[in-house]
Amino acid sequence: MSTTAQLIGADPGWLIIVKAALVFIVCVVLTIMSVWGERRIVARMQQRSGPNRVGKFGLLQALADGVKLALKEDLIPAAADKVVFILAPIISATTCFMSFAVIPITGEVTLFGHKTAMQLTDIPVGVLYVLAIASVGVYGIVLAGWSSGSTYPLLGGLRSSAQVISYEIAMGLSLVAVFIYSGSMSTSDIVAAQGKWWYAVVLFPSFVIYCISMVGETNRAPFDLAEAEGELVGGFHTEYSSLKFALFFLAEYVNIIAVSALATTLFLGGYHALPGLGFTETWLGGWFTLIWFFIKVLFFFFIFVWLRGTLPRLRYDQFMQFGWKVLIPVSILWILVVATLRVLSLQGASRAVVLAFAIGIVIIVMAVNILFENSKTKKKNMPVAQSAKPSFAVPELPIQVSSINVSQKGGDRV
Amino acid sequence: MSDQIEPIAPREISVHDVEFEQVVQNGPKGFFDQLQGFWVTFITMFKKVNTVQYPEEKEPTAERFHGRHQLNRHEDGLEKCIGCELCAWACPADAILVEGADNTEDNRMSPGERYGKVYQINYLRCVFCGLCIEACPTRALTMTNEYELADDSRSKLIFEKADLLAPLRQGMLMPPHPMYPDMEDVNYYRGDVKGSHPSQDVQK
């Protein structure tokens, strides 16, 4: 049996073009449907019915919105840097599609009489390529914020860059464990390596970290600080209108689908069927794997919508604290554990050794946790320190109060 | 001058002298308590949708909803409005214009001396507060529950007397016509008139 890379490598040129077109069409259609789906699902979560006017069940709502946006007046602010202002949405909208090139959508299928797989290309560093493309996509947001020549977009753009930089580290680290276990960075190899057990099970902590950081990466609620309608009036795209805004909108949803597709590929066994349903993979000449793939992608999409419907937006400092002080250290520690286990098993260590190592890790984690909790309670019980008057000038308080203690009834001066 | 102003004495009372309740701050909830929110949103998806599909299905308003105004009639068809302009004076938004005129024997629109000749309500100004209804001494002006008042021009939203007048009900005669025989205007206001009398039908 040949590998996917060899299979795809034998594609004639015209088939590659056909496949590229297909992938693009699938992306766009899926985006339009997902906009509709999200609005319907969020509406149901709030006991509303959502868009139901345009077409059957409102299915054409996203299309109507697109037409509306395209027909609107295209404004460019006087203070904007014109070239960058126009370039930014183009960067956003083009890069978001590119990561689909390495996503394996089906297994071996026959397309126009050719044996191939629905995957545009299979490069040895496929996942790295996806990460790189995702980071280039951030330029769209940052440049849009900067070039608008306005305060809110600038703040939104800065927030976004900080956000994506911090969460990309956690994301990358969570993928390292996958690389270690599969021994490859190629997406098709990773899918093939998950034949027996999905990495979502084997590498559960990595899966959780990836799921959290992919929400941060796509600027989605509850991590949508870059847009933050309530505080930044839309953030980086405040000054955008018409088609340029539509491009950002499109990019956001394609990005969601893209990270969902990547999560499917890396953790949920890609186009493979659910455990126990492996016989379905040969149905429809292998095309049934496409259905499995999209079921998994849509599952992730539903999680995105569910998060948006449930959680309020994080405060910026909490968000940064979570990324740098929780996600990144945890994923580094997890990689150490995974790497050690991997080396132990590759060198043929006995089961007892592996078990001892695992128990040791658990004990260490518990000990650290207890110490942490102790210091927290100690800190909590410490009396509030009397701060000396600062050396610089401060306005006098209307009433001389050193501190107000509300924790005690009729509390006395501290 | 400045030395005449007494400096404000430092306040005798301190914040600590005020009794206050203990504020319990539990801090963040546990992980599984926080997950409850996800269950709430999930289960809501399967609940009945609250939306009313408005143009297709309409729900009745509250009983005393403040909708479009109506100029009522007495039981024999004469108008209740006496052109006193109290509604116009009561209106905080200056939305009502009334011009009264005298009733004559051949042109009687309402019992008594006067009737409202011109009656306009500008629904671009009206705030539906109902003060005009409170001001009306004859219950001529009331509000209906009708709320579909949108239109596409300013002039269409100034309702004339003809737009506001209540339709003629069974037993009512289109004014102008004389008062019920042997009845004074006071009888009308007391509700003694229960319908029209054949002699009032001057059209015949």
Image (tube, rainbow, N blue to C red):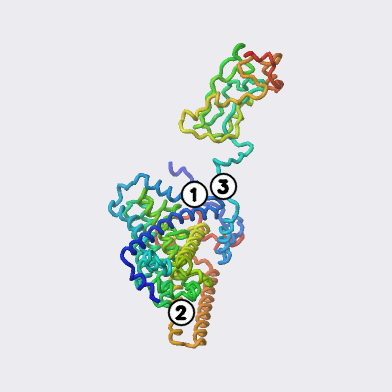
Residue B51 numbered mark, or none: 3
For the residues bearing labels 1 and 2, Cβ distance under 8 angstroms: no
Quarter holding residue B22: bottom right
Q: Nearer the viewer, mark 3 or mark 2?
A: 3
Query: Mark 2 is on which residue type?
Result: Val
Compute the Cα span from label 3 to label 2: 52 Å
Place of residue A283 in the rendered image (x, y in percent of width and height, measured from the top left): 48, 67
| Disc 1 target residue | A58
Per the image, label 3 sits on a secondary structure element best described as loop
Looking at the image, residue B164 lies above or below residue A334: above
Please state if B129 lies on the left or on the right of A243 as rendered.
right
Same chain shared by disc 1 and disc 2 = yes
Quarter holding residue A255: bottom left
Q: Name the residue nearer the viewer: B104 or A71.
A: A71
Q: Name the residue nearer the viewer: B191 or A55.
A: A55
Please state if B57 lies on the left or on the right of A299 as rendered.
right
Query: In which chain is the residue bearing label 2?
Result: A
Quadrant into which the N terminus of chain A falls: bottom left
Quarter holding residue A5: bottom left
Compute the Cα span from label 1 to label 2: 49 Å
Compute the Cα span from label 3 to label 1: 15 Å
Q: Nearer the viewer, mark 1 or mark 2?
A: 1
Q: Earlier in the sequence, mark 1 or mark 2?
A: 1
| Disc 2 target residue | A337
Query: In which chain is the residue bearing label 1?
Result: A
Per the image, label 1 sits on a secondary structure element best described as helix
Q: Residues within 10 Å of mark 1 (few under 14, many from 20)?
A: some
Place of residue B128 in the rendered image (x, y in percent of width and height, measured from the top left): 56, 34
